[in-house]
Image: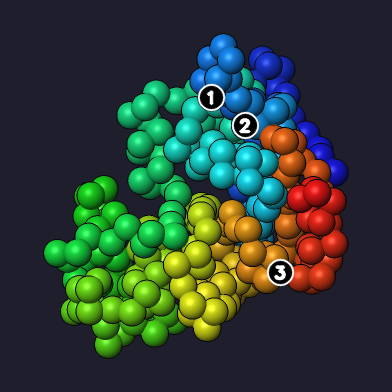
Amino acid sequence: MTSSPSVSTATGGLRSPAGVACAAEQLVKVYGTGDAQVTAVDGLSVAVAAGAFTAIMGPSGSGKSTLMHCLAGLDQATSGRVLLGDTDLTALSDRELTRVRRDRIGFVFQSFNLLPALTAEQNIVLPLELAGRRVDRAALERIVATLGLADRLRHRPAELSGGQQQRVAVARALVTDPEVIFADEPTGALDIRSGHALLATLRGAVREQGRTVVMVTHDPVAASYADRVLLLADGRVAGDLDRPSTDDILATLRPLDA
């Protein structure tokens, strides 16, 4: 199921409708040239609801990571448009995109991406310091308390477990109060217990704080934590599931993997 995520203005521009955090319209992303050319995303249109947890799934090479990277402004579209709220990311310069990623988007990656020489607290507040923004101590304390990190703030990454490091990465993504948090296989390096705890944290951020989370995952159990699961195949939408169970996701994925 696909729908146009935006409406045209009188001047031919695009405006994101109410309740949409980010969107793609007729998005195409091509890598390489000639015989090596690969179309990773092929004319895809999708809108991501604000205040919801959306998972993106699909077989290897389906375009799920490319879609997320384009939505997050990490990769440039070949054609089509990408919106973050009312901002057309495809019309921005590299400097403007960097500012948008810094000020309006949060990232959680499988590899944590923590700086080893900094403490947990220093890693968490680093995006604010880079942006020249004041640290809201009350907000910081709420986030670290929710994530169970209050007694780990002085520890460096090497002194933390994998689950604790990933929670530091989540705190870093939350502390800037982003419009959208993008999570790329966030449980991939975690054990089952830590992975489920992280997913519960992301779901809680959505349901209790009204955050918007977009997660790429290959794990049907992880995807079942989401409000919506978007399934891709060959760079196009192949399924769109509302609050699915793990069994629902597996049943829909099976023909895509065949």
Mark 1: secondary structure: strand
Q: Which residue is mark 3?
A: 224
* Residue 212 drawn above or below residue 101: below
**Alpha carbon separation for disc pair 2 and 1:** 7 Å
Quadrant holding the N terminus: top right
Disc assigned to residue 111: none
Q: Residue furthest top?
A: 34
- The residue type indicated by label 3 comes to Ser
Q: Which residue is mark 1?
A: 31
Task: Tell me the residue at 14%/64% (across/down).
Answer: 117
State which quadrant residue 88 falls in.
Answer: top right
State which quadrant residue 174 falls in.
Answer: bottom left
Q: Percent position (x, y) of residue 32? A: 51, 20
Q: Residue furthest left?
A: 117
Decide which of 92, 37 is in the foreground and name it. Answer: 37
Q: Is residue 16 visible?
A: no
Mark 2: secondary structure: strand
- The residue type indicated by label 1 comes to Tyr
Q: Percent position (x, y) of residue 137? A: 28, 73
Q: Is the residue marked by circle 2 packed among few (<14), some (14-19), or many (20+) residues within 10 Å? A: many
Q: Which residue is mark 2?
A: 40
Q: Percent position (x, y) of residue 176? A: 38, 58
State which quadrant residue 160 falls in.
Answer: bottom left
User: Do the residues under discs 2 and 1 have CB atoms within 8 angstroms?
Assistant: yes
Task: Tell me the residue at 50%/64% (across/down).
Answer: 188
**Alpha carbon separation for disc pair 3 and 1:** 31 Å
